Image (cartoon, rainbow, N blue to C red):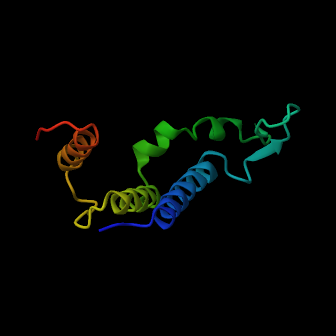
């Protein structure tokens, strides 16, 4: 099945954007931080904790987030995984697909694209 690249790429980009946006909101809650424009053009704003939020903000790390694995994070990753699976043409993909199966398919695809044979 031939897929149009643009809709597939847009679906991946949208899912990735949603995941990143949700993580950013968790890492730097709006009511806990101030965003100060960076003096160097092109650099992102500096994120400064609001008074009294320093300790809480310091605990908002990606490690802590992924250790908690809230349902919104799991769902966002599943949406991104599903969009990528569509790009690979994996019509039978589900979040329950074992990592070993995914890795075997990716290896087979890489070998095929490299012009090699093998299982």
Residue 23 x, y percent position in the rendering: 56, 50
Q: Point out the residue furthest to the left here.
A: 119
Residue 111 x, y percent position in the rendering: 22, 39
- 28 or 84, which is in the foreground? 84
At x 78% / y 42%, what residue is drawn? 50
Residue 85 x, y percent position in the rendering: 33, 59
In the image, is 1 to the left or to the right of 68? left
- 44 or 89, which is in the foreground? 89
Q: Point out the residue furthest to the top here.
A: 40
Q: Quadrant of residue 33?
A: top right
Q: How many marks?
A: 0
Q: Quadrant of the C terminus?
A: top left
- 119 or 42, which is in the foreground? 119
At x 21% / y 56%, what residue is drawn? 97
Q: Point out the residue furthest to the right here.
A: 39
Residue 71 x, y percent position in the rendering: 42, 60
Q: Quadrant of the N terminus?
A: bottom left
In the image, is 56 to the left or to the right of 97? right
- 2 or 19, which is in the foreground? 2
């Amino acid at each position: 099945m031939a897929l149009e690249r643009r809709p597939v790429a847009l679906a991946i980009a949208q899912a990735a954007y949603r995941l990143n946006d949700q993580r950013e909101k968790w890492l730097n809650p709006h009511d806990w931080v101030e965003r100060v424009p960076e003096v160097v053009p092109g650099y992102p704003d500096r994120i400064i904790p609001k008074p009294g939020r320093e300790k809480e903000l310091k605990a908002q790390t990606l490690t802590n987030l992924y250790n908690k694995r809230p349902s919104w994070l799991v769902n966002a990753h599943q949406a991104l995984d599903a969009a990528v699976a569509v790009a690979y043409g994996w019509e039978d993909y589900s979040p329950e697909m074992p990592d070993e199966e995914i890795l075997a398919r990716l290896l087979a695809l890489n070998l095929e694209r490299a012009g090699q044979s093998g299982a």
